[in-house]
Amino acid sequence: MSVETPAPGTVDLDAVDLSDREWWAGPPSVRYATFAALRRERPFAFYAEPVMPMLPVGPGYVAVTRYADVEAISSQPAVFCSGRGRSPSRTSRPTSTSSTGR
């Protein structure tokens, strides 16, 4: 699939909310254009956390949108980690949650 990079200024990044489920359910072309614009204009975009019933609202999050930045951040867990001290790891393996251990 070939996806054209939109021209600068064609996506209103101030109106984007990556926490909005409806945005994710929208047309793929909108997501492609949005992420192309984020990579170009705001590779480290800050977003408020969504309101979740019965949970306190968190401090927000940074969406890292360029592959090289994600790779660099993921390789330095002592420097970059989430608020609870966990960061993605290439060596992480899914654990079994079944009662049979499979």
Image (cartoon, rainbow, N blue to C red):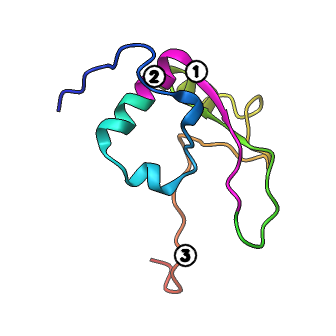
Q: Which residue is mark 2?
A: 37
Q: Is residue 29 left or right of residue 41?
A: left
**Looking at the image, which residue is at 71% across and 44% down?**
48
Res 28 → quadrant: top left
Q: Residues within 10 Å of mark 1 (few under 14, many from 20)?
A: some
Q: Is residue 100 above or below residue 43?
A: below
User: Do callouts 1 and 2 mark residues in contact (Cβ within 8 Å)?
Assistant: yes
Question: Disc 3 residue type?
Answer: Thr
Residue 52, given in percent of the width and then of the height, sits at 70, 65
Question: What distance separates the C-alpha of mark 1 from that of mark 2?
Answer: 7 Å
Q: Is residue 53 magenta?
A: no
Residue 84, given in percent of the width and then of the height, sits at 79, 50
Label 2 SS: helix
Q: Nearer the viewer, residue 41 or 15?
A: 15
Query: Which mark is drawn over residue 65?
Result: none
Q: Is residue 71 left or right of residue 31?
A: right
The residue mark sitting in front, 2 or 3, is: 2
Q: Is residue 50 magenta?
A: yes
Magenta stretch, residue numbers? 35-51
**Looking at the image, which residue is at 59% across and 41% down?**
89
Q: Which residue is mark 3?
A: 97
**Looking at the image, which residue is at 63% across and 29% down?**
45
Q: Which residue is mark 1?
A: 42
- Earlier in the chain: of badge 2 and badge 3, it is 2
